[in-house]
Amino acid sequence: MRKAQGLTISGYVMNNLTPGPLARWLTGPRFNALPAPAALPAPRLSFEFFPPKTDKLEEQLWACIRRLEPLGPRFVSVTYGAGGSTQERTHATVARLVAETSLTPAAHLTCVGATRDEVDEVARRYWAAGVRHIVALRGDPPAGATEYVPHPGGYAQAEDLVRGLKRVGDFEISVGAYPETHPAALSADADLDFLKRKIDAGATRAITQYFFDAEVFLRFIDRCHAKGITVPIVPGILPVSNFQQVVKFSAMCGASVPAWMGQLFEGLEEDVETRRMVAAVVAAEQVRLLQANGVDEFHFYTLNRPDLTYAIAHILGARPRKD
C-alpha cells in the first residue's frame, strides 16, 4: 500500500494498472489541500501607498485608502520618491491620514539628498503631526545618478538614520530587508549583516522587498534567525497587475521572476481582465502557502490600486471591521 501526502492507494491497484493517463494520475504524487483560512489566525496586514502627483491620481489614492481602511491594517505606509523628490507630498498625505482616517500612518524617510539636520527636522514635523512610525530606508539615488553617494553631512546608511530618528523621538521604526540580497550588497552574508545592524540600532520590524517564490522568503527567515535577528520579518507582497513592468523593475531591484510566472501571463498583454484574474490566483497561492507555514503578517505594495489587495486579504481571512 502506497501512502502519499496522507492519501493511500492500495497495492492491488498499484499492481494492476494499465499504462495510460489513469495510470499516471494514480501513481503520481498526491497533495492534500492547504489549511482552510478559518483554521488559521486572522492575518495582520499593512498597506503601502505612494503620494499622488496630480489631482486625478490623488482621487485614485484616496479611493484606494477608503476601500482598504475597513480591513483595519496595523499601519499604512507612504513612500518617499527617489532623492527625496516627494517629500512635501508624502508629508501632506501622511498628515491627512492622521486627520481624516482611523488608520495609523508610517512615513517613509531616506538618507538621500539632505543633511542630518534637514532629515531630523522632517522627523520632528512628523512627530508634531502625530506620526509615531517611520519606515527608515537608505533610499535610491536621485534621477540621473547610477550609484548611491551619501550626502555631505547626511546620514550615510539606514542604520545611521535609525539611530538619528531614535534621538529625535521614540518612533517605531521599520526597515527594509532583501530575501534575494540588495543589488548593491557585496554578498548575501554582508547584506544580512547590514540588516542586523539596522535592528541593533533600534528598528523594531523589517519589511521585505517583494518576491514571488515562497521558499525564497522561508529560507531567508531561517538565515535571519541563525544571525540572531528576532524582530518580525514581514513579507512584502506585490500583486502583479502589469507583468512586463514587473519584469523590468525586478531586474533593477534584484527580485527574481520565476519562469512559470511568465508562462502564466504569456499572451495576456492586451487582456487586462484575464491578467487581473491570473494575478489574483498567483498572489493568493503565494500568501496561502506562506500562511500555511505560520506567517501571519503581510505588507502589501498596493500601487494605489485596491481591488487585488482587497481580494487577496479576503482570501487570507481578513474581514471589514464592524463599527
Image (cartoon, helix red, strand yellow):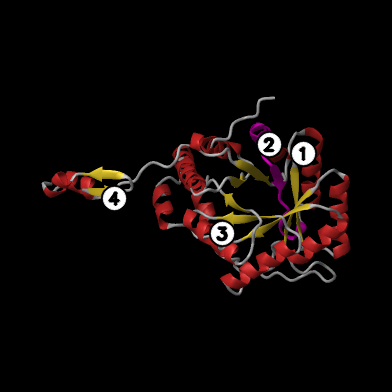
Towards the viewer: 17 or 19 = 17
In the rendered view, does 288 fall on the left or right side of 104? left
Please state which of the two labelled residues, at mark 1 or mark 4, is closer to the viewer.
Answer: 4
Residue 185 in the image: x percent, y percent? 62, 71
Q: Amino acid at mark 2?
A: Ile
* Residue at the (53%, 57%) spot, across then down: 217
Q: Residues within 10 Å of mark 3 (few under 14, many from 20)?
A: some
Residue name at image x 39 percent, y 51 percent: 263
**Of helix, strand and loop, which mostly describes the magenta segment?**
helix
User: Magenta segment range?
Assistant: 60-84
Residue hosting label 3: 221
Find out whether the residues at labels 1 and 2 contact each other: C-beta distance under 8 Å.
yes
**For marks 1 and 4 on the same chain, the one whose residue lies earlier in the sequence:** 4
In the displayed structure, 29 sits above or below 137; it is above
Identify residue for label 4.
Answer: 29
In this picture, residue 27 sits left or right of residue 95: left
Residue under label 1: 97
Disc 3, SS = helix
The disc placed on residue 65 is 2
Of pointers 1 and 2, the one earlier in the residue sequence: 2
Report the residue at 72% width, 47% height from top.
78
